[in-house]
Image (tube, rainbow, N blue to C red):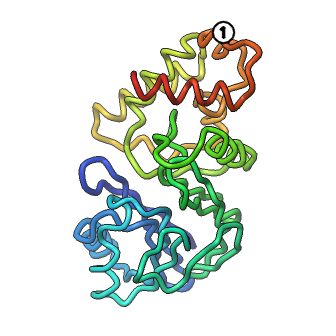
Amino acid sequence: MIETLIFPCLQDNFGLLIHNSKENKTLSIDAPEAAAIEKALIQKGWQLDEILITHHHFDHVAGAAALKEKMGCKITAPKKTKLAIADVELEGDEEIIACGIKFQAIPTPGHTLDQIAYYAPEEKILAAADALFSLGCGRMFEGTAAEFWDSLNRLSQLPDDIMLYCGHEYTQANARFALHVDPNNIALQRRSQEVEQLRKLNKHTLPISLGLEKQTNPFLRVSDPAIRAKLNLPVASNEEVFAALRALKDKF
């Protein structure tokens, strides 16, 4: 009954449509580019009913106004986003129903202060936008290291069989950094090779299981002794290791 579709938007953003065939309704996670979303809808024969906004950055909201005006779709956004065209504003930690699908709105500050991830437990979908990437995480523009680590730690507590959808196709670059700080990780080596092949074929590296991310993403593995040794932080707190990883990635 549930079908997902990811497709490129802008330079390296992902568009994500989730279609509920039982109710014949479709929602979009964010609205990076109206034209790309409209094209995907037309190709599938779907009508856009709702948009769930994750955070305020332009490349996640740029197409929202045009889509709302043309299609009359309902827009749900974090209250902190202060999106004037939002019909529903979320504080975070609510349970909502969008297009007949139950979502948990999980606050994930760090990349921005307003960011919310949308988790559909029955469909095993996690739309994390720029909080969690495959093999990486977003830049820390607004939040603190403590906030960001708490957000990632919370997401890492979700079941392994969830499929992770992210806001950008950054996996190839993230893999290079992950191998730099965790070179002996066999699962990471395999994932990196897979990513290289997918990109050579111009295929998406997402979605990916959260379980595999827990094995390969250094930002979810800050307690690992090998990563700590690489950073020369054997007895630091998880938050301190995360902060060091994020700072190193910013310069990588």
How packed mark 1 is, by other alpha carbons closer than 10 Å (few <14, some 14-19, many 20 or more), is few
Q: Nearer the viewer, residue 18 or 234?
A: 234
Name above or below for residue 44 compared with residue 197: below
Q: Which residue is mark 1?
A: 229
Pick the front one: 250 or 159: 250
Percent across and percent down for residue 184 are: 59, 10
- The three-letter code of the residue at mark 1 reads Ala
The answer to whether 41 is drawn above or below residue 147 in the figure is: below
Residue 74 in the image, given as x and y percentages of width and height: 46, 85
Report the quarter where the N terminus lies. Answer: bottom right
**Quarter-wise, where is residue 175 in the image?**
top left
Q: Is residue 175 left or right of residue 89?
A: left
Quadrant the C terminus occupies: top left
* Quarter of the image where one finds residue 236: top right
Q: Write the residue at 65% across / 29% down.
A: 215
152 relative to 23 in the view: left or right = right
**Residue drawn at (70%, 62%) of the image:** 121
- Where in the figure is residue 42, as x and y percent of width and height? 27, 76
In the image, is 63 to the left or to the right of 99? Answer: left
Q: Residue at x 54, y 16 (%)?
A: 181
Q: In this figure, what is the number of numbered marks?
A: 1
Seen at 43% across and 52% down, the residue is: 167
Task: Report x, y in % for residue 106.
Answer: 66, 61
**Compared to 3, does 149 lie above or below?**
above
Tell me the SS state at disc 1.
helix
